[in-house]
Image (tube, grey):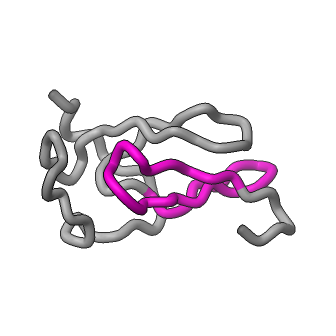
Amino acid sequence: MPLRARPPDPGPRHSPDWYDQTGEWEVLRPGDRMLIHCEGGPSRSRLETYPPRLEVPEPDGVYVLVDEGTRAEWHYRFVPHGRLP
């Protein structure tokens, strides 16, 4: 069961209705916590609130959310400053 009611961190994100949760094990509500895997950069994963931020700034770059497929496939891809994804 997800943890609930965490205030979201600031940053751009899609509205909860943007995501089709059909076929997911559990329907998430705004504020539910979720762990998202990271590719590259300083983190292995990030604890985010649903809906997750589209971009997460870091000192050396930014994590960009790749939210295609099921939630289990979502991940953040690190893009160093000065490079395009």
Residue situated furthest top in the rendering: 1
Q: Nearer the viewer, residue 29 or 23?
A: 23
Q: Give the left or right position of residue 38, taking residue 21 as reference.
A: right
Residue 55 forms part of the magenta stretch: yes
Residue 72, by quadrant, is top left
- At a point 18% along the width and 47% down the height, the residue shown is 24
Residue in the image at 72% along x and 36% along y: 42
- Residue shown at 54% from the left, 34% from the top: 45
Q: Is residue 35 left or right of residue 41?
A: left
| Image quarter in which the C terminus is found | bottom right
Asked if residue 31 lies left or right of residue 26, the reply is right
x, y percent for residue 4: 19, 36
Percent position (x, y) of residue 38?
A: 58, 41
Of 27 and 69, which appears nearest the observer?
69
- The quadrant holding residue 1 is top left
Q: Is residue 83 above or below residue 52?
A: below
Residue 2, given in percent of the width and then of the height, sits at: 20, 32
Residue 14: image quadrant is bottom left
Residues drawn in magenta: 53-78
Percent coordinates x, y for residue 69 in the rendering? 36, 58
Up-down relation of residue 20 to residue 76 (above or below): below
Tally of marks: 0
Residue at image position (64%, 44%) is 39
